């Protein structure tokens, strides 16, 4: 499904539609409301990117995947309902600054999707189970990250390019670190990997030349 009219204010996608194409509604500046069908399975990358007036998203239970940057730049988005089985995707909710945040962290379904704060020390709150793909990639001045005991997964590129990051502590129950999760964290010195860790992605610690 792909929209041919970017001046619409609301849209109901008909039953039977299974895929919303890449960039289908991208930059539809007037779009305020979208209703998805129960038949929907896949929302492709950047499908609703930069829909600046979109305020609410309710994703049906049958959806299995949402693509990278699907809702990036939806700066008026205040409410998101997304099934827990859908994996986080890179930039899924980047720049969605109207979503509720905790200490600068936009958290949906116990996953930190994006960080909009400027603190040098960040404490991931208890209950969070995942640091989403690219969540802290563009943070500024971050030096210390304290993980909650509930965090199980650090997603792909979660802290990539954090060149001021020196330590990540509290990694007590981590089971997975995604690819390039800490790539180019050149001053990272302290990160103790637990026995629970089962998966370490490619280039997870590439160019972490200070890591001991």
Image (cartoon, rainbow, N blue to C red):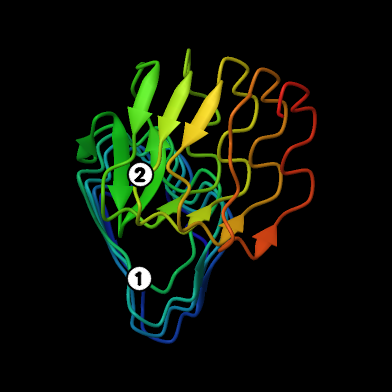
Q: Residues within 10 Å of mark 2 (few under 14, many from 20)?
A: few
Q: Which mark is residue 131?
A: none
- With respect to residue 118, does 176 lie above or below? below
Locate residue 51: give its quadrant.
Answer: top left
The residue at which mark 1 appears reads as 84
Q: What SS does tag 1 mark?
A: loop
Residue 190 spot, x, y in % from top left: 59, 29
Nearest the eye: 179 or 62: 179
- With respect to residue 64, does 87 lie above or below? above
Residue 153 spot, x, y in % from top left: 51, 56
Residues marked 1 and 2 touching at CB (< 8 Å)? no
Give me the residue at 57% from left, 15% from top. Answer: 164
Q: Which mark is residue 7?
A: 2
Nearest the eye: 6 or 122: 122
Nearest the eye: 142 or 113: 142
Q: Is residue 153 left or right of residue 129?
A: right
- With respect to residue 26, does 191 lie above or below? above
The quarter in which the C terminus is drawn is: top right
Visible in this render: residue 178? Answer: yes
Q: Is residue 208 left or right of residue 153?
A: right
Name the N-terminal-most of marks 1 and 2: 2
Q: Residues within 10 Å of mark 1 (few under 14, many from 20)?
A: few
Nearest the eye: 165 or 42: 165
């Amino acid at each position: 499904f792909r929209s041919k009219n970017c001046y619409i204010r609301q849209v109901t996608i008909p039953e039977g539609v299974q895929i919303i194409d890449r960039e289908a509604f991208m930059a539809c500046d007037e779009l305020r409301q979208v209703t998805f069908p129960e038949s929907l399975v896949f929302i492709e990358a950047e499908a609703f990117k930069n829909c600046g007036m979109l305020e609410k998203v309710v994703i049906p239970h049958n959806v299995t995947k949402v693509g990278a940057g699907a809702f990036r730049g939806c700066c008026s988005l205040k409410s998101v309902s997304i099934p827990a089985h859908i994996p986080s995707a890179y930039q899924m909710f980047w720049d969605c600054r109207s979503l509720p945040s905790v200490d600068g962290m936009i958290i949906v379904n116990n996953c930190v999707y994006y960080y909009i704060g400027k603190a040098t020390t960040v404490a991931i709150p208890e209950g969070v189970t995942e640091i989403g793909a690219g969540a802290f990639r563009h943070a500024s001045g971050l030096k210390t990250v304290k993980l909650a005991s509930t965090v199980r997964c650090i997603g792909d590129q979660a802290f990539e390019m954090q060149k001021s990051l020196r330590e990540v502590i509290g990694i007590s129950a981590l089971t997975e670190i995604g690819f390039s999760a800490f790539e180019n964290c050149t001053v990272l010195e302290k990160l103790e990997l637990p026995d629970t860790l089962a998966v370490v992605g490619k280039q997870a610690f590439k160019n972490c030349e200070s890591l001991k």
